Image (cartoon, rainbow, N blue to C red):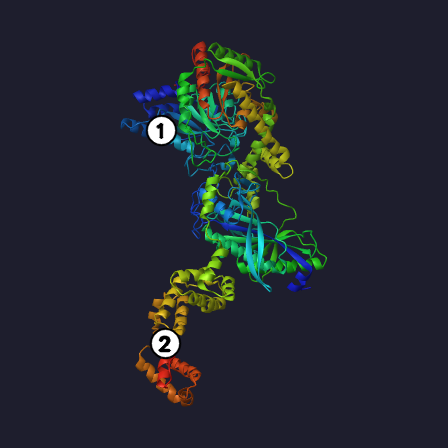
Amino acid sequence: MALSYDDVIAKYEPVLGLEVHVELNTESKMFCSCSTTFGGEPNTQTCPVCLALPGALPVVNAKAIESSILIGLALNCQVAPYSRFSRKNYFYPDMPKNFQISQYDEPICFDGYVDVEIQTDEGPKQFRIEIERVHMEEDTGKSLHVGGATGRIHGAEYSLLDYNRAGIPLVEIVTKIIPGTGKYAPEVAKAYVAELRDILRGLKVSDVKMEQGSLRCDANVSLRLIGSDVLGTRSETKNVNSLRSVERAIRGEMIRHAELLNEGKKVKQETRHFQEDTGLTRSGRSKEQAEDYRYFPEPDLVPVAPATTWIEELRAQLPERPSLHRKRLKEQWAVPDKEMAAMINADVLDIVEETVLLGADPTKARTWWLGEISRVANEKDIAIADLSIAPRDVAEIVALVAAGELTDKLARQVVEGVIAGEGTPAQVVAKRGIKVVNDDGALMAAIEKVCAEQAETADKVRNGHVPAAGALIGAVMKETKGQADAARVRELLLGHLGQATN
Amino acid sequence: MIKTTASEMSLALAKGEITSVALTQQHLDRIADVDKKVKAFLHVDTDSALAQAAAVDADRAAGKALGPLAGVPLALKDVLAQEGVPTTAGSKILQGWKPPYDSTVVAKLKSAGVVILGKTNMDEFAMGSSTENSGYGPTFNPWDLTRTPGGSSGGSAAAVSAFQAPIAIGSDTGGSIRQPAALTGIVGVRPTYGAVSRYGLIAYSSSLDQAGPFGRTVLDTAMLHEIIAGYDPKDATSLKVPVPAVVAAAKSGDVKGLKIGVIKQLQGKGYQAGVLARFYESLEILSSLGAEIVEVDCPSFEYALAAYYLIAPSECSSNLARFDAMRYGLRTGEADGASAESVMNSTREAGFGREVKRRIILGTYALSSGYYDAYYGSAQKIRTLIIEDYKKAFMQADVLVSPTSPITAFKIGEKSEDPIAMYLADVATIPVNLAGICGMSLPAGLADEDNLPVGFQIMAPAMQDQRLYNVGAALEAALVSKWGGHLISKAPALGGAK
């Protein structure tokens, strides 16, 4: 029954397909001038167009076209000289027109690729993910189904509708099928979504916040026997809301498919929903009877025909590719491979870079984010980005340590205070009364006390066994409640015991 | 002075011979007098009309610069959204809905100082050729109250024909301005697709819909055309070109040396004898005015009706999906435990009439997977062929002409049980819509057999709307001098005219 992942990959080859929806960060919606700000009072960011009042007409947001072309170019796609919008017809209360305006058979960009690198047992390995298409569409409103066990429309007592999201511009990025990733399929998928996110962030076209839904991934997974060239039946997993979930969802689906296949059962072609708590998927609607969306060209809009000169202007504006950017940072900061991989894996590279740009030493910045702050995030089981500590706080702390106003130990207390919401580092220092003891008189008193208590150790040091000083320094630090500068303590202690300080 | 023309009213207002309030009141009185019989209006906006009129009078008194139709009353087809005024598109499903916004056409009328008297009856969602498909009962033809005024803009046409308003706005998806204009003895123009903004025009078939003007004369129609046309950033299909000089053309009326093409396919079989007699008579007049008459061949027109009845229903099946009881309009079936889906079903069942349902079903079928290529796809190809036919024809002639409608006004109920017979009423008007070009219908006289108005259709290439007015004005002037007055003056008096 319960198969291990190793059992699965020994017998089957996974084939992936990833569909990523990106909410663009344009100021106004795809087809009207309503605001796109996240989190507004329900139904305050609406107008006749996005509420589909009788007579209202859509007009394409030029900025959304520009963003879509930028995305296509960054993904090495062709830009269509002529593309159209279509109507995807289906009834659902949160879709005001009861059709979605989307690009169907004529996407704005097509045929591209993204290269991703993952760490494997044999070292770093590159995979090329081919992009089938990049197309534009509009988001739906949001339904909140109240009552009922499942939170779905069936069985709900009533539903609340918020049309603020209706008409927010979306770009959908669809890969071609991705074979050949073998046992690394989950990691490759995760690396692809991460790379995509970094590319989009670099383009400044989206907030790319998976937890807010501005970047959403649907993962198609199928298995086939190793050596076979016939594709298996795929499932499409939705609701995958973090990079970690991408990896977990694909791994989980691979195991589920393999179990079914091993039992001689068929995998159903269906939509499944990822459950964050269990890491499993549950069945959504079946796709066996394919829905008929009655696509036809949107007659209210004219075709999109971007001028070649404009496309070339946009191409010239493309920022540095994330992979090159990473390479440059690695060299500039002189980071070892392992540390670089750790930063990428913990998803702190941007945050470290921001901290460095605010003046912090790269090594110090990295150590704080990867060490103490990551530890707290893990403890609290939340994303680092959601902690209430920002790059400017860490930069300030690093500066305080460098100026000798904090010791590393005291700095940890300050980090803890900032995360606890006690204010900026300066405010935490003031509130908690944290202060480096740099009054040599007070330190000497503590040193003398400690040397008297631990006379045996003090003698060892006097006799030239310097490493033994560590225990004494520790005791002095304890005596001064960690508020002393350890370097100064060492200096005074060694001097006191007749040893050279260097 | 309700029996004069809009241009005469405009002149009288400018000279201070009458106030807009008085002129508006005369029309409101006429409506009160005859609309019980004609049923042109779904909603008469008495207070607001008088307030608009008073505002124009005040502006005039203050010496402000006013547009040519400022203070002149108008009837508005109920398919156009007007802020705060009930707008139903002739459908029960929108009963009670008051738009929170003005359509671009209404905004332009308001800023031109045109006084909007109220909303006129129409076939539900503009689907029909008789105004019998209205959810609120039929409109009656002022020439013979047992007959229809045509449709779908039958209310607007009847209002102008019955002197309830000198000018009106209609919309024309397959002939819905030109055919009722023909059947009520007035002038109606369907402008080039994209010339008049569709923003706020409740959509029937987006790629075919176009709002346009009605008047009792070619000049009045041109004056209204010039006000409502123009580029609108709110309509992506709106044309970014200057409005053609239609008023100047309507004042010119010179056909000397023009080539006028008679479309071979739009005459003969199926056309009433009296209709053809008036049509050929008009051709002779044009010829005598110095135009050269040529015959042109448009072989694909044979398939125009079939293509139209696939494209329009396909688009409407999608356009009308929004009427789902969730945000506005009618809502039925809200019993305890009713689901959103059952409320949608019940509302659409109760709110839509038979013809609308027929077209939604037709369109849903035509777009469904497996049938799309055979139906919607083929219809689009025919559309391309029709455009090609026109292109060739316009290389041989400056304008093309035909009878507007093969028949004169038909009896109420005569065709309402036979959709195909009803659809044939638009056989001569539909090609213009499929090609996105412009067309006019103007009165050519009365058919000998029934003494009912006959319409003469003129067609011109896209963005050449001024040609319609030039040719129309020439023909109109010759006919008026022949008749000793406008045809409309022969219409029955109805009530006690004031």
Q: Chain of mark 2?
A: A
Observer-side mark, 2 or 1, equals 2
User: Dot 1, crowdedness within 10 Å: few (<14), some or many (≥20)?
Assistant: many
User: The C terminus of chain A appears in which quarter of the rendering?
Assistant: bottom left
The quadrant in which residue B478 appears is top left
Residue behind mark 1 = B113
Left or right of residue B441, residue A12 in this image:
right
Q: What separation in Å lies between label 2 and label 1 (alpha carbons)?
A: 83 Å
The x and y percentages for residue A332 are 44, 61
Q: Is residue B354 visible?
A: no
**Residue extending farthest left:** B62
Q: Chain of mark 1?
A: B
The x and y percentages for residue B33 are 42, 23
Q: Check the image and report above or below for B380 versus A426.
A: above
- Of residues B288 and A471, the one nearer the viewer is A471
The quadrant in which residue B371 appears is top right
Residue behind mark 2 = A485
Q: Secondary structure at mark 2?
A: loop
Q: Amino acid at mark 2?
A: Asp
Q: Which label belongs to residue A272?
A: none
Left or right of residue A500, residue B450 in this image:
right
The x and y percentages for residue A133 are 56, 46
